[in-house]
Image: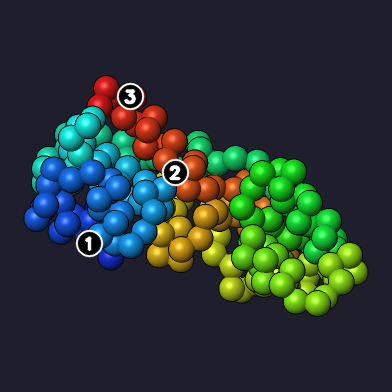
Amino acid sequence: MIPIELNKRQNEILEIVKGNGPITGEQIAERLSLTRSTLRPDLAILTMAGFLDARPRVGYFYSGKKTSQAISDNIAQMVVKDFQSIPVVVEESMTVYDAICHMFLEDVGSLFVVDKQSLLSGVLSRKDFLRTSIGNQDLNKMPVHMIMTRMPNITYCMKEDTIIEVANKLMSRQIDSLPVVKERKDGLEVVGRITKTNITRAFLSLADDHDL
């Protein structure tokens, strides 16, 4: 079984619950100066891994790592390919204005940019668009390759990576999604995307399977 390594925020949550449980998710978020939605993936991981127990209208309390072997094994075996969604991809030549429209029409938090060979070359976030829109640039003429985050500064994952690995990447980098890629001789091909929502659904499916 692959051991689960907790990140700094998850350890902080455990300490808060140990000293103050039972405590609600909203109260934990308030102590960390974060939103409840930001903490949701962390709380899902800690609950599914058995560090925390949760009761409706009561809150979270520390239980210690006592989850059954079967559940722990299932967590370790959950991989990206089983939960990934369709990527939203744009070309480097697309204008910033068109990309903004595309992002909101697709209702996603980030766009993956590909070059003429359809290989991953960049990532665009809502923060990138907001930062660019504040200036005096003509968004109808500016191509997205001028404002995107470029390789090799892009965090990505493979289809066979575990959900735990990806969840920790998302939390440590403070990003909402990762491109799922396949290695080619000339670069990386985008084959999917994995988001915090995908991660949460993955752990909720595990809860349903074990009637938690």
Mark 2 to mark 3: distance in Å?
Answer: 16 Å
Q: How is the image coloured?
A: rainbow
Above or below: residue 186 compared with residue 14 = below
- Whether residues under marks 2 and 3 lie with C-beta atoms below 8 angstroms apart, the answer is no
Per the image, label 1 sits on a secondary structure element best described as helix
**Label 3 crowd bin: few (<14), some (14–19), many (20+), radius 10 Å:** few
Q: Which mark is residue 156?
A: none
Q: Quadrant of residue 55?
A: top left
Q: Give the residue drawn at x 22%, y 32%.
A: 57
Name the spot of residue 143 as percent of width and height, x first: 84, 68
Q: Give the residue drawn at x 19%, y 42%.
A: 60
Mark 3 to mark 1: distance in Å?
Answer: 28 Å
Above or below: residue 32 compared with residue 17 = below
Q: Left or right of 67: which side holds 204? A: right
Outermost residue, bottom side: 136
**Label 2 crowd bin: few (<14), some (14–19), many (20+), radius 10 Å:** many
Per the image, label 3 sits on a secondary structure element best described as helix
162 vs 94, nearest the viewer: 94
Q: Nearer the viewer, mark 3 or mark 1?
A: 1
Q: Which mark is residue 12?
A: 1
Q: Left or right of 132: which side holds 126? A: left
Outermost residue, right side: 141
Give, as a three-letter code, the residue at label 3: Asp
Name the spot of residue 111 as percent of width and height, x first: 68, 55
The residue where tag 3 is placed is 209
The residue where tag 2 is placed is 199
Mark 2 to mark 1: distance in Å?
Answer: 20 Å
Q: Can residue 69 be seen? A: no
